[in-house]
Amino acid sequence: MLFNTFEYLFFFCVLLFFFILTNRNNTLKIRNILLLAASYYFYAQLHIWFVVLLIYTTLVNYFCGQWIVRAQSRGRTGKTAVTVSVVLSIAQLAFFKYAYVINPSILLPIGLSFFTFQALSYSIDIYRGKMKVEKNFINVALFIAFFPTLLSGPIERARNLIPQLKEKTPICWDNFTAGVGLFVWGLFKKVVIADRLAEYVNAVYLSPDSHTGSTLALAAIFYSFQIYCDFSGYADMAIGSGRIMGFKIMQNFNFPYCVNTFKEFWRRWHISLTSWFTEYVYISLGGNRVSKVRWLSNISIVFLLSGIWHGATWSFILWGAIHAVLYLGEHFAGPKKPNILYHLFVFVMITFAWIFFRIENSMEAWYIVTRICSDLISPLYWGSSMFSTLLTIFLLGIFIIREYLLYRNILPQKYVCEYILLLIAICLFGVSSDQFVYFQF
Amino acid sequence: MRKKILYIFLVLLIFIGIDRLIGTIINGGLNRYFGLNQHSAVLLIGHSHLMLAVDKISLEQEINLPVSKYCREGVNVADRYEMVKQYLSSPYSDSLKVVLYGVDQFMFTGAGLSKNSYKLFYPFIDEKNMNQYIRESADISDYWLHKLICTTRYSDALLNSSIRGYRGDWSNYKEGHLDVDVLKKQISKGLQRHIHFEQDLMDYFEQTLALLTQKGIKVVLVNTPIATPLNEYEPDLYRRIISYFQEKAESSPLIYYWDFNPRYSSEYELFFDPIHLNSDGQKVINAEIISRFNKEIEI
């Protein structure tokens, strides 16, 4: 069940009705059981066996959490327990993710990377003493399976979501309008921008060698916006769904293309994953309180792991490595006061990096980069229809303007007419798709 | 609470109002583009093949009759039957004398043309015939989505057609030429469509002819050129289907068959791709149609 379907709308409305009925201090247990059942049902719609993996992850992290606390109460660190939790969780992830590469007939469970990392935040936070162990199994299971964040994040932290699950959430008009607004904006980004851009990008990347440099450049720019709108659109719909029910889910994107530096980009892109790696990997490695060489290695490790997290192909590792080089290059040789030209440079380099992310064959990706550089002034392919491509560029322009106005805080965010127009645009220009780019991770 | 419910109701009302207004405007353009809002003596029915071969404006001027060009990309024979019924059931059909109906050797081949082509008719879902056709073809959620929300009914191609309808623009913008070597390579790899005789599609064709001739409307089966390598790909089947069209023409004084393949299918500079003509090709074939129309068709 996907957010951009009527099945989801129906599912959510029915669930919301019962959620409101049970969202009382004396019926919280019933409410959470209802939410858990709904979350499992939501996931089972993709494949019934996926739920088994979800339950496995829940059991591992729930019992390891108890084990950590027991060990710590006996004066031990609980390191063995947290290691078991990490190894057992990552083993499942590694098996499906990398076995899929060796044998594509093995089904890759959608959202596995997301809920595994979300679950690990529970065990690691208990080990680090950042949160108390949760005795109620339903709450832990619901935290890991919470349907808005299940398939594509944001990767929530246990210390943020579990306390909300233990309380009556504020269902109010403000949350309702903010949630609906966010959902509509996310849906617009997904079906009007990302899916339209995908049509051109897929057509060009199907046979890159038969296209000119200008066409490949346009496809690369389109892909930069496609992946952003696809992923952030999903995140907005997830956060919006949660907000309607009164839950505050962490932000995942914060205008990443509006920034001037690579460092700033990584503070604003896939925030939940970046902050996860920062908190649980980078800081564990010593962070920046180490020698320069160690710091360089820590940064590189985090970027490479970030690449590997997306999949076991050289293209993802290369993508991580490119970003590590850009990040470190900027740190040592970047401008002190970045100007508009540097901003453009940052965007261009990020766009080049996305080519390696999108194209599985790194040699082919490199061919595209060289073709763009050597053949930029060349005839442009207009896609299956020039009208469609021009319309897509026009809609992308509107999106960029709105995004910039929001970034600058110029646009009044609760203007109802704007959302009516967004809905009309979704109906009129939306393209239906059953794929989200980040589902494959 | 009551205020909030009223507020939601008002927002819904505004949405519905804007949605209906946009739907009416777009349909206005589409009706102009397809000529569904005019009393025409000549109706063109076909897919992109015929669409790119005929210049509506010059045809109207040269034969001195109003023409409706109801050609849609990707429509199969069943869809064309519905298109004919749609025009005949409209209040504008009383003046109809001739239908130019696009035919080719692939028209009874189900594969290749979309099975979801009923979606092309969503803009006309409010018309009785089309409503019935879509209801039978679409799944229930799709049907009600498009029935209730007008703005979901239009693809980019339809939006473009609507704008062209308001601009009065029926031009063929296809430039460029067919690369015959590429086509031959594709054929050698077996990548081309095959000629089939699917009975259900043949039945729809027969029904269309019967529907029109029973009303005394002349039907011209127009076979606009297709590049020679495609015509020679399956020679026996090709001859069989051409004979079928000729037999149809001989079976009734109201049916004609015009085949432009023998004369033009090897003039590759007229083609945009193996089955579509470019703007030069349109000028040539359009002139041929005008010439034969003035010679052979008496109104």
Image (spheres, rainbow, N blue to C red):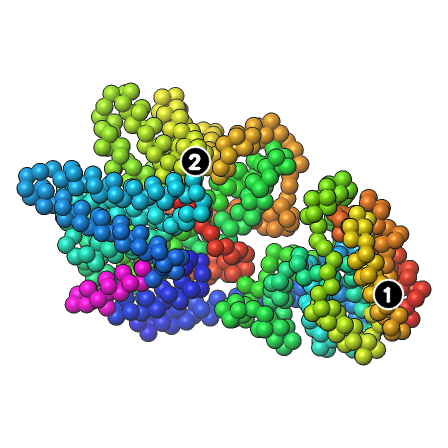
Q: Nearer the viewer, residue A441 or B218?
A: A441
Q: Position of residue A68 (x, y in %)?
A: 14, 44
Q: Amino acid at mark 2?
A: Thr
Residue name at image x 81 percent, y 50 percent: B232
Q: Amino acid at mark 1?
A: Gln
In contact (CB < 8 Å): disc 1 and disc 2: no
A62 sits left or right of B26 in the view: left
Q: Is residue A26 magenta?
A: yes
Q: Position of residue A328 (x, y in %)?
A: 36, 25
Q: Is residue A74 magenta?
A: no
B33 sits left or right of A404 in the view: right
Alpha carbon distance from label 1 to label 2: 59 Å
Q: Nearer the viewer, residue A221 or B227?
A: B227
B45 sits left or right of A126 in the view: right
Task: Using the image, name the chain to which the residue with label 2 belongs.
Answer: A
Q: Nearer the viewer, residue A334 or A156?
A: A156
Residue name at image x 80 percent, y 69 percent: B99
Q: Which residue is mark 2?
A: A313
Q: Mark 1 falls on what kind of element?
A: helix
| Image quadrant in which the N terminus of chain B is located | bottom left
Compared to residue B175, the image places residue B93 above or below, namely below
Q: Which residue is mark 1?
A: B246
Task: Using the image, name the chain to which the residue with label 1 belongs.
Answer: B
| Image quadrant in which the C terminus of chain B is located | bottom right
In the displayed image of the protein, which residue is found farthest to the right?
B295
State which region is magenta.
A22-40
How many other residues sit within 10 Å of disc 1, few (<14), some (14-19) or many (≥20)? Answer: some
